[in-house]
Image (cartoon, helix red, strand yellow):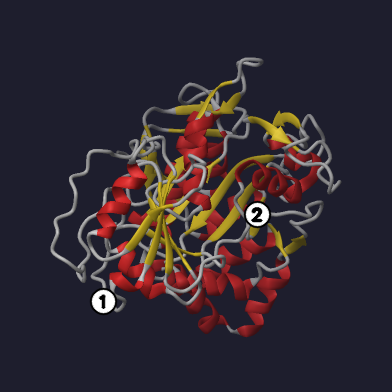
Amino acid sequence: MAGGVVVALTASIGIGVALHLDDNISRVDIAAGSTQRPDDVDGALNILVIGSDTREGLGTKEYGVGTAEGGPRSDTNLLVHISADRKSTYVVSIPRDSMTKAPTDCADPTSTVANGEVRRWNDNFNQGGPACTVKTLEGLTGIYVDHVAVIDFSGFQSMVDGLGGVEVCLPEAVDDEDAQISLEAGRQRLTGKEALGYVRMRKTLGDGSDLQRIKRQQAFMASMAQEATKTSLLLRPDRLYKFLDAATKSMTADDDLGLTKMMSIASSLKGLGTDEIVFVTVPTEPYAADVNRVQWREEAADELWAAVRDDSDLPGAEPKKKVKERALTVAPSDITVSVVNDTAATGLGTQEAEALQVQGFTASVADVAPTSDARGVVVRHAKGDTESARTVAAAYPGAKLVVDRTLTTGNVQVVLGMGAETASEVPNREGDEPLPSATVTAPPAPTAVESRTADEDICG
């Protein structure tokens, strides 16, 4: 859908307008102050979308004229993860009131999360702009941020109007003076101004918390995605232009996120349905020092970040359905396998090595200390040796294949993590000795995170 929007716009209005849209965007160096950044996973994309609470360009003082700290803050923080196979997208909401470690001085390369201070999440943007938010996120999660897009109040309002409004579903009537909004209960279409008040209000709907507001924002984004997929938008170049012109005029982005890059990303997502866009929130718990703040629930948050970092399934999600694989081309007897037991289950590595040995593999347990952060089964292989890895992975349906430049051709490593399944027979196994009975199992997979998909009924 998104690819069709951009292509239709370019074809209908022309290259000159496309260049104009590109020139609308303000630029920022998101790597400023960072000398050591995480590894960039090939193919996958992580885009940090920040909603700035600057009031400039609104043409009104209804929402105030500034912030208590002076300068804008990150009112909304979304990490959009696009999988390498373009079959799924995670939109992770980061509560703005989260208390986390952060670099004391983001502009100083020697100042890092590790030697930093604890502060509220949206103060990172206030103190150091997008680069500080990126440096903090990368330092906390080990996730490489490919791109950043900052949209302000004015841009959000204009984008909604560019779509012709967006539908919402209110459980009760609201009248919020601070948010400048008065709405009836039920399903209705909001203008840009009404939508801005709707996604920002906290005092008159729900429990007044930022977490409750995030749920409302996620439902609104789902509704926006549904609206954008309607063919009426594709058939109206004037509306397409109004939408993208509003977005780019109010956008600040990294140097590499121009219209050409946006078109490339959009084109790669043309087969992505709204049912494959998943909204989740970083798991949190109360922050003891201040009841008005939260902190990330360490284990659950780490599991979520690991899924994003490793481009794998969300915690507790059903594994993606695998397409029918082509025939295996490398025999088990031509492959040496080292098995790494990255769990606390004693004997799991030995059991799995034996299950591979009876099928013709030369298999042994690797002398590697567990890190206890692996998920499922990862099959590591030398560059260019995918066929050997495919034969090994056939014993573990759903296993993730990863290139490891330290390995040589014909040598494959199997890493067993939480939730790993035990070995099954590969189609081209050798010998007829039955696989030994599995008596050891990996610890269970992480608990599912609360989520919603973009195709869900907004009144559901």
Image quarter of residue 55 = top right
Q: Is residue 15 above or below residue 136?
A: below
**Closer to the N terminus: mark 1 or mark 2?**
2
Q: Which residue is mark 1?
A: 326
Residue type (three-letter) at the residue carrying disc 2: Pro
In space, the residues marked 1 and 2 are separated at their CA atoms by 34 Å
**From this viewpoint, is residue 208 visible?**
yes
319 or 201: nearer the viewer:
319
Q: Position of residue 187 (x, y in %)?
A: 35, 41
Q: Quadrant of the C terminus?
A: top left
Q: Which is nearer the eye, 103 or 91?
A: 103
- Secondary structure of the residue carrying tag 1 is loop
Q: Which residue is mark 2?
A: 38
**Which residue is located at x 49 percent, y 53 percent?**
310
Task: Give the camera-side residue of 425 and 334.
Answer: 334
Q: Residue at x 41, y 71 (%)?
A: 270
Q: Nearer the viewer, residue 209 or 105?
A: 105
In this rendering, does residue 271 appear at all? no
